[in-house]
Image (cartoon, coloured by chain):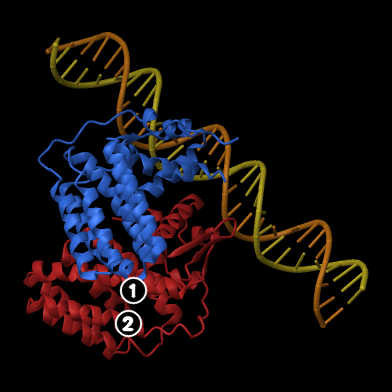
Chain colours: A blue, B red, C orange, D yellow
Amino acid sequence: MSQSPEQQIVEHVLDAIADQKLRAGTKLGEQSLSEIFSCNRTQVRRALATLTGYHVVEHLPNRGAYVATPSEADARHVFEARRAIEMTICKNVVQFANPADHARLRANLAQEHEANAAGNRALAIRLSRQFHLILAEVGRNPVLSQYLEELTMRTSLVLGLYGSDQRSLCAVDEHAGILDAIERRDEAAVCREIEAHLRHIEAAVDFAGAPKPRGALSSLLGPIVIPT
Amino acid sequence: MSQSPEQQIVEHVLDAIADQKLRAGTKLGEQSLSEIFSCNRTQVRRALATLTGYHVVEHLPNRGAYVATPSEADARHVFEARRAIEMTICKNVVQFANPADHARLRANLAQEHEANAAGNRALAIRLSRQFHLILAEVGRNPVLSQYLEELTMRTSLVLGLYGSDQRSLCAVDEHAGILDAIERRDEAAVCREIEAHLRHIEAAVDFAGAPKPRGALSSLLGPIVIPT
DNA sequence: TCTATCATAATTGTTCACAATTTTTGGATT
DNA sequence: AATCCAAAAATTGTGAACAATTATGATAGA
């Protein structure tokens, strides 16, 4: 059951980024990580290389690894790529989704509503991302799924860097509208709504706003349970 | 000018795959590569990890790295992803392309014609792939460019595995048609033609045909010039 | 001749020590 | 105080030795 230290590091860091706990620019020191996850530095090194491949970590030679700091141009490119990929995903979803898939999406939507009602911002963000990833899974194209996983991660970084804080509440209702259209099997409507949804998210990004400060590493990745 | 051994290995292997010299299933032994590129095994290891991240190499624990062998389902997913991504790229191309870009594409097209006329199949394949990559560059979205780079690589693997050998000649004229539409700035036509083009390539793949044999490693990657 | 078993060889995986580079620290000087 | 410089510390990069696993091939028995 327990995975390799390398996978553990990758997933913990990705989760922390998706949850916007690890902010852009945070240094990911090899020693720190090897102590936090109580493993060898070699394994930390491999994990960081993997994360670099996902474009969520930048590697500066002789200076270490940092959570990537996407520029405004990067952000726009990521959003455009999302529109291209999620549009195709949604067409597949309309075609392939069965009642079980609808139920899965409905359940996620309900949780989103709940998290928002409870004011649990971190959970709401996580569930919102999850909604898109479930869509991708239902679309049944692993290539597109994997690209979207990376792109949503990079979106998290962008929102953490430039996002205005009071947004993201509107998003729930847009998810609901998309899901309605999916159940109606109304392809045109789904495409229209997912595109609008992604453009709304992008519009909520304020590149004029100053990048925000970052926290300390150890407090953001833990607590780590070491399997014995 | 001379790059790190790691980059060298990655690029040589990618080129060899794109040119269909390295076929699916070929073993990429660590020692062989370290001798061919006269470098440390550690660097070979990192290069193979990178290639694994690109999905062009499969890594079997304790058994080594092999050029990936995409299944029929993989192939279909790759082609669908290409349609999604290249469609968006082409829209950007219509919008952004300037005379210099047109010239670049025309030049590539002419070389393609020439290679086909001369019966130089390897060069024709390389230039055909290059046409799509130039389109991506002109589209001015590095995120989409990078995805397409990976997808064209995987396409090469698929064509090498399942492709019928007499195809790919028709492709040149389709490229010409696409470029014409781009210069006319006829977005609808460009989209229609690039989609048709990609579907033609996919249609030329024959999954019933038996996977083809693979060659020896050292003869396919060399000759390697070692910078002093 | 075919199969099974075991020793040997080859290959991959891991660890650790050392080298190279960067960052920090603590004066010394202006 | 502020700046500069050098020594020390910390961090990253590299390579080689060792361990673990898998492939190979020879031998014996059916």
Residue for badge 2? B201
Q: In which quarter of the image is the C terminus of chain A?
A: top right
Q: Can residue B227 be seen in this view?
A: no
Residue A30 drawn at (x, y percent): 42, 35
Q: Which of B108 and B36 is in front in this view?
A: B108
Q: Tell me the SS state at disc 1.
A: helix
> Left or right of B94: which side holds A8?
right
Q: Which of A108 and A14 is in front in this view?
A: A108
- The dot on residue A15 is none
Check whether the beta carbons of the residues at disc 1 and disc 2 lie within 8 A of each other.
yes
A54 up-or-down from A64: above or below: below
Q: Distance between the residues labelled 1 and 2?
A: 9 Å
**Residue for point 9% across, 78% down:** B186
Measured along the vertical axis of the image, is residue B178 above or below residue D2? below
Q: Which residue is drawn at 22% across and 46% down?
A: A70
Residue topped by disc 1: B79
Q: Which residue is drawn at 50% across and 80% down?
A: B211
Q: Is the residue at mark 1 from the same chain as the one at mark 2? A: yes
Q: Where is residue A68 in the image (x, y as percent from the top left)?
A: 28, 43
Q: Mark 2 lies on which chain?
A: B
What x and y, as percent, mark residue A91? 28, 69
Q: Is B48 located above or below residue A33 in the figure? A: below
Q: How many labels does the image show?
A: 2
Would residue A67 be found to the left or right of residue C16 on screen?
Answer: left
Query: Of callouts 1 and 2, which one flags the residue occurring earlier in the amino acid sequence?
Result: 1
The amino acid type, in three-letter code, at marker 2 is Ile
Neighbours of disc 2 within 10 Å: few (<14), some (14-19), many (20+): some
Tell me which chain the residue with mark 1 is part of: B
In which quadrant of the rendered view does residue A96 lie?
A: bottom left
